[in-house]
Amino acid sequence: NNLLSYEKSTVQFHMQQHLRLLYIDSLTRVYNRRYYDEHFQDVNNIQAMVVIDVDNFKQINDTFGHQYGDQVLREVADVLKKTFRRDDILGRLGGDEFVFLLRSVPNFQVMEPIFEKLCRQLQKTYTKDGKSVTISASLGAACAPGQGSTFTELYSKSDQALYEVKNQLKNGYRLYGN
């Protein structure tokens, strides 16, 4: 009986490890694109999506190298993890793009102080060997169900809002349609 219990717990452990490898970004330790693709075709229980892009990140890689850039991405992910709530879902879709799925958001105005704080926290200058690059964050958001009822629809609207920010000022945020 103890052997059966041991085997069962070993199998469960290995299954959890396998899922972790499938769905967790190895660099930042947040969910990856595959997790979102397989789990969020619709947006049940999701009230808002926020897409976050690191401004000037390419300059970090070009100036300091990819290993340095990897460390910057880890720092960004750590700030994001600390900023949002435990039941919100953070992922890295690739490169310097992150996404949050938010639950229990009564309205966009409630999120504005959090977005402002996040923009302040992610604005940072990195210096090495006499060269400096300043990064910041641009955020685009969309709310369900009014602006989409699927992951793809919300992502598209959030991404449009994000690029409005990037084209106008960077280091800011916008709700789709505002």
Image (cartoon, rainbow, N blue to C red):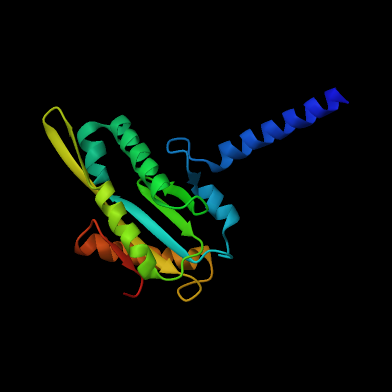
Residue 99 image position (x, y, % from top left): 43, 54
**Residue 31 appears in the figure:** yes
Determine whether, in the image, residue 85 is placed left or right of residue 126.
right
Residue 11 image position (x, y, % from top left): 74, 31
Q: Is residue 35 above or below residue 46?
A: above
Q: Is residue 102 above or below residue 82?
A: below
Residue at 75 percent of width and 30 percent of height: 9
Q: Is residue 52 above or below residue 9?
A: below
Which residue reaches farthest top?
A: 3
User: From the image, which quarter does the N terminus lie in?
Assistant: top right
Which residue occupies the foreground of this view, 72 or 88? 88
Residue at 46 percent of width and 50 percent of height: 90
User: From the image, which quarter does the C terminus lie in?
Assistant: bottom left
**Residue 55 appears in the figure:** no
Residue at 41 percent of width and 68 percent of height: 142
Residue at 37 percent of width and 37 percent of height: 74
Which residue reaches farthest right?
A: 1
Residue 50 image position (x, y, % from top left): 40, 60
Determine whether, in the image, residue 52 is placed left or right of residue 104.
left
Residue 19 picture quarter: top right
Count of marks overlaid on the render: 0
Residue 150 image position (x, y, % from top left): 53, 67
